């Protein structure tokens, strides 16, 4: 029996990792997005216009989804979303890149959070510390908890020398270079932690399963999959 393709990381904020749930998603891109929204609407019991994707660009742009921003956030380009409003479902699509979920707290009460899409380009640009730092400031948080989601592991992520030269978290195996994305993500969070000693940080990577090795559970670009894992974040009313 294959492991469940849906992992509940946290209950409130409600954070989930959704892998190979429905192969019927694998149609043309527009139809695929429509099916994904319908699936998520049914799963989370929310309206489709409360579900926010991005046109992901492997860059460093991010958006806060709240108030009037919600009207245009679905069509925005970028690689990270955050919100402080309840019942706004934020979604990042991955198939080897690293999803980073984060929850923000003020005096131990949740005040916001979101999700980051980080491939090697985004990691090199610093999307993780940039989004975390901006969100901490935006929501006046005093603590943040981060969870790393499924991505391709170092063992299977061979990169060219032009990429390897940009990172310290690279292993040289007989002239071939392998990038450790989860370690890069953790190191960047720890770098921000040292700069922001006014903020309490927690970070976990037990959900950073290798998408390549666990291809029965997750989509992997390097396995030639056209599907995408859906990584979701939503604040629930308490």
Image (cartoon, grey):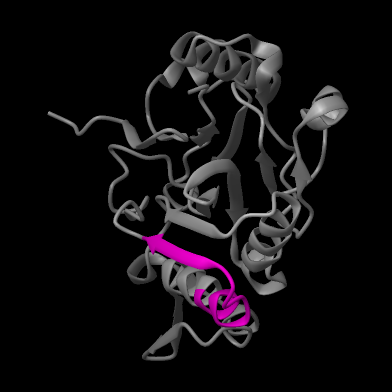
Is 5 situated left or right of 35 in this image? left
Residue sitting at x 59%, y 34%: 91
Can you give x and y, in whole percent of width and height, for residue 180 in the image?
A: 43, 73
Q: Nearer the viewer, residue 1 or 189?
A: 189
Residue 94 visible from this viewpoint = no
Residue sitting at x 47%, y 44%: 224
Is 205 situated left or right of 177 in this image? left
Q: From what the image shows, is residue 179 above or below residue 113?
A: below
Is 127 situated left or right of 228 in this image? right
Residue 160 visible from this viewpoint = yes
Can you give x and y, in whole percent of width and height, for residue 96 in the image?
A: 48, 52
> Magenta stretch containing residue 197, yes or no?
yes
Q: From what the image shows, is residue 14 above or below residue 214?
A: above
Can you give x and y, in whole percent of width and height, for residue 167 in the image?
A: 57, 83
Q: Nearer the viewer, residue 186 or 175?
A: 186
Is 9 situated left or right of 106 in this image? left
> Magenta stretch containing residue 180, yes or no?
no
Q: From what the image shows, is residue 120 above or below residue 238?
A: below
Q: Quadrant of residue 46?
A: top right
Extent of the magenta region:
190-204
């Amino acid at each position: 029996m294959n492991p469940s393709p849906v992992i509940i990381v946290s209950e409130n904020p409600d954070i989930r990792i959704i892998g190979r749930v429905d192969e019927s998603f694998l149609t043309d891109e527009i139809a695929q997005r429509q099916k994904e929204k319908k699936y998520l609407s049914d799963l989370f019991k929310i309206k489709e216009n409360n579900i926010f994707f991005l046109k992901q660009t492997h860059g460093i742009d991010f958006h806060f989804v709240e108030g009037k921003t919600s009207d245009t956030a679905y069509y925005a380009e970028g690689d990270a979303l955050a919100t402080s409003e309840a019942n706004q479902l934020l979604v990042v699509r991955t198939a080897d890149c690293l999803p980073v979920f984060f929850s923000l707290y003020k005096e131990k009460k949740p005040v916001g959070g979101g999700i980051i899409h980080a491939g090697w380009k985004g990691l090199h640009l610093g999307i993780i510390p940039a989004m975390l730092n901006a969100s901490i400031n935006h929501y006046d948080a005093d603590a943040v908890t981060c969870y790393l989601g499924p991505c391709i592991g170092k063992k299977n992520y061979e990169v060219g020398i032009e990429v390897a030269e940009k990172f310290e978290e690279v292993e040289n195996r007989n002239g071939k270079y392998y990038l450790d994305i989860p370690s890069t993500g953790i190191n960047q969070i720890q770098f921000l932690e040292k700069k922001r000693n006014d903020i309490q940080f927690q970070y976990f990577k037990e959900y950073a399963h290798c998408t390549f090795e666990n291809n029965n559970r997750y989509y992997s670009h390097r396995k030639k999959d056209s599907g995408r894992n859906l990584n979701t974040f939503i604040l629930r009313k308490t």
